[in-house]
Amino acid sequence: MDDKLTVATVLKPQGIRGEIKVKVLCDCAEDLFDVERLVIGDTEYEVMNVRGQGDFAYISLKGVFDRNAAELLRGLDVLAYREELPELPEGTYYIADLTGCKVLTEKGGFVGEVVAVTPAHTDVYELKTPSGTLAFAAAEGVIETVDVENRTITVNEKRFKEVSV
């Protein structure tokens, strides 16, 4: 597993003192409140302050003192160290941990490999299969187990066929 996870994308500078506005890729901005370090581009920054809620956060970074310095970060991904992020609730996983997992039926049949997960009310998984690409909604009863350590996701074959396209 990666020791850093992409948690946001820099949208723009906020004000004249170097604060940046980011689009949060976690469940909410509050997930970033206790993060002490962030990596943007090739540089690690000490976090001075985080505020915000929902999908957006405003972050002050040590060494980014004015609007011009903040402007240089526009469009870059924001990475956080996994150990600084809040513990996930049971049954919740980071997308980075799901990508690359093999999807198997409950009988052990190979379905494909997860190449992307689109977060939504019901997440949509995109798979690379032997016959091309396939997508399925993680609707109730589709996913039976997730084992990120062994990189496998087990699905109910009947329910999977009902929701896959």
Image (cartoon, helix red, strand yellow):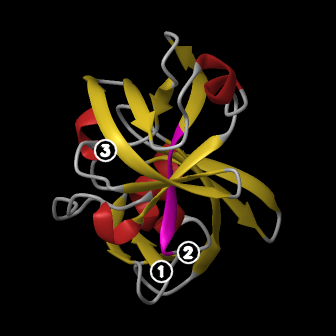
Amino acid carrying mark 3 in the image:
Leu
What x and y, as percent, mark residue 42?
Answer: 70, 58
111 and 84: which one is in front? 84
Looking at the image, is mark 1 or mark 3 nearer the viewer?
A: 3
In the image, 18 versus 3, the foreground residue is: 18
Evaluate if marks 1 and 3 touch, with contact meaning CB atoms under 8 Å apart: no
**Residue segment shown in magenta:** 3-8
Residue 36 versus residue 13 in the image, above or below: below
| Amino acid at the residue labelled 1 | Thr
Residue 150 location, x and y as percent? 45, 90
Tags 1 and 2 in contact by the CB under 8 Å rule? Answer: yes
Residue position for label 2: 101
18 inside magenta stretch: no
Q: Residue at point 28% right, 48% down?
A: 140
Residue 139 in the image: state x and y as whole percent.
35, 44
Q: What residue is pinned by disc 3? A: 32
Q: Which residue is drawn at 50% across and 80% down?
A: 1
Query: Residue shown at 22%/58% (left/top)?
Result: 86
Residue 68 can be seen in this image: yes
Across and down, in percent, residue 159 comes to 40, 54
